Amino acid sequence: MNAAAKKKIDPIQAVKYVLLVAASFVVLFPPYVVIVNAFKRENENSSPFALPESFFNFDNFRIVYERADIGHAFLNTLIIVAVSLLGNIVFGTMVSYALGRLDFKGKGIVLALFLFASIIPNITTQVVLFSMIQSLGLFNSLYAPIVLFVGADVLQIYIYLQFIRNIPYELDESAMIDGASLFRIYRTIVFPLLAPATVTLVILKTINIYNELYIPYLYMPKQNLVVVSTAIMRFAGNNQAQWGYICATILIIMIPTVVLYLFLQKYIFAGVTSGAVKG
Amino acid sequence: MGGLSYPAQKKIVLALFLLVPLTLLGMFTYYPAARLVYLSFTDWDGLGSGMSFLGLDNYREVFTNPDLFGVFLHQIPYAVGGILQNIVAIGFAVILNSTLKGRNAFRVLLFIPYIMNGVAVAFMFQYVFDTTGGSLNALLGAIGLESLQQSWLGNAAIVNWALAGVSVWRYLGYTMIIYLGALQSLPSDMYEAARIDGANRFQSLWHLTLPSLSRIIQLNMFLTLSGALAVFDLPFVLTKGGPAGASETFLLKTTETAFQFNNYGLASAMSVVLLLLTVLILLGQNAALGRKGRD
């Protein structure tokens, strides 16, 4: 409304665009170089910025797909994400239902335990967890990352609690008048109404697990237990400075989350913003 | 279960719903944390059960050996970069919160680095920083700034700044989105009132916007500083701490001490020190702002 009133070119508006375009250039420059070089043949000796002879040259992708074990990497990552999230949603909604709907002694302590856990730098505890995972017999198995990712965390509980507060308690009460058990209320009323929060959390956690490096690196050194993060690390380590191959690998690994993001940005922004308010 | 009274049901549901999540939390977070504290007083080698009690020796080693505590100096660029990142992020959040054509496109674009796979980002920047074939040196050459061409990851004086730059590139959009979300929740009539009272844009930014962001700034500064203390992924992937240890970080040292040198006692002491420093930042920040912080 404000802008319609003044039509003349505003110098401040111009400065804003200059800054935004400059920032966009900085953001896009590295991915641009990766994209153009992923399509170049080994003997295409051009500058890193030059376009490839053809964008239909998929040689690098074909070679990388086999050598970097990308198929295995995607499959293992998918299994870890799916199993971890399934458990994580069940546990997260249960804790949040208990905290948000039931009064009990020690509620504050439970919340504080989850909160304080979030400030412990999680790589430090691996020093102890490493021998625990080994003695549990989970070393070199997909269960190692799964048991570490499956637990509820404070961000999730916080987002669920915000939603639970907005579910009218009258719904619970009228179900109780009908004689529904508390478990039934959780399963048929609260859990379904948390769906929007669950969608947001599934997307954010998928991205986090997909991007996690150290846990798969530490607990799954076995060749066929590769995930996306470790696949690119192993491959780039063995193919130093072969930029065509490395760029193709980077692209293959980046595309899934970028596509997910472009389609589901609404949920991602919602999660990031509401998660931050907890401070 | 429907046959039981609600108070009885409540007890059962509470027990069942909290049992597994709290067990997981205890097993994989608090037990390891407690064990870290215990091991930090010993010389455990990670293998058998044999260990002897060393008292505070490990802590003395952490604080007096410049190879250990001294590497925090390498992490100053990350803290500086993080503070700049917050300032720039607030700037862009304010810009994108104003009336502007295409602002959603810019918002989507600036956030993209955050959702990219971290290891892929690291290797992307390995290419950017490569001395001979890298795109940054090529770019500098193309605009006539050959004198600035560098061995970005091979020069001990520059490597940590280069890595901190990657970190800013990756997290700027994320920080900006948090600030933008906070700005959008501010009531617009507040600005209307200020405008009627004759406040210019800069005055309302300084006197209205920044004060109402103080809680979010506090949160982001905590994330920035605790993140700078716990830098790990980028040097781990890109430089392995090199050249000649110039980009080692405290956490990188901690994992090496444990997993390469099997000195789990010392590594535990380092972990405890890192955790205490993180808590110290949190407490210091809350004290400085004279408020309880989390409510």
Image (spheres, helix red, strand yellow):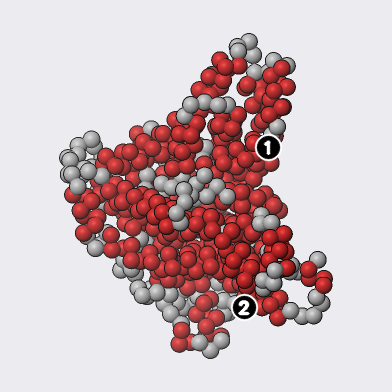
Judge by depth and name the residue closer to the eye, A11 or A27.
A11
Q: Is residue B39 left or right of residue A209?
A: left
Q: Indicate the quadrant containing the N terminus of chain B: top left, top right, bottom left or bottom right.
A: top right
Of circles 2 and 1, which is in front?
Answer: 1
Where residue B11 appears, as percent x and y from the top left, is 53, 19
Question: In the rendered image, which residue does mark 1 sit on?
Answer: A166
Question: In the rendered image, which residue does mark 2 sit on?
Answer: A50
Dot 1 alpha-carbon crowd within 10 angstroms: few under 14, some 14 to 19, many 20 or more: few
* Residue at image location 17% in from the left, 44% down from the top: B54
* Residue at image location 36% in from the left, 75% down from the top: B157
Where residue B66 appears, as percent x and y from the top left, is 24, 63
Q: Is residue B66 left or right of residue B162?
A: left
Judge by depth and name the residue closer to the eye, A228 or A88.
A88
Mark 2, chain letter? A
Where residue A94 appears, as percent x and y from the top left, is 57, 30
Q: Is residue A132 visible?
A: yes
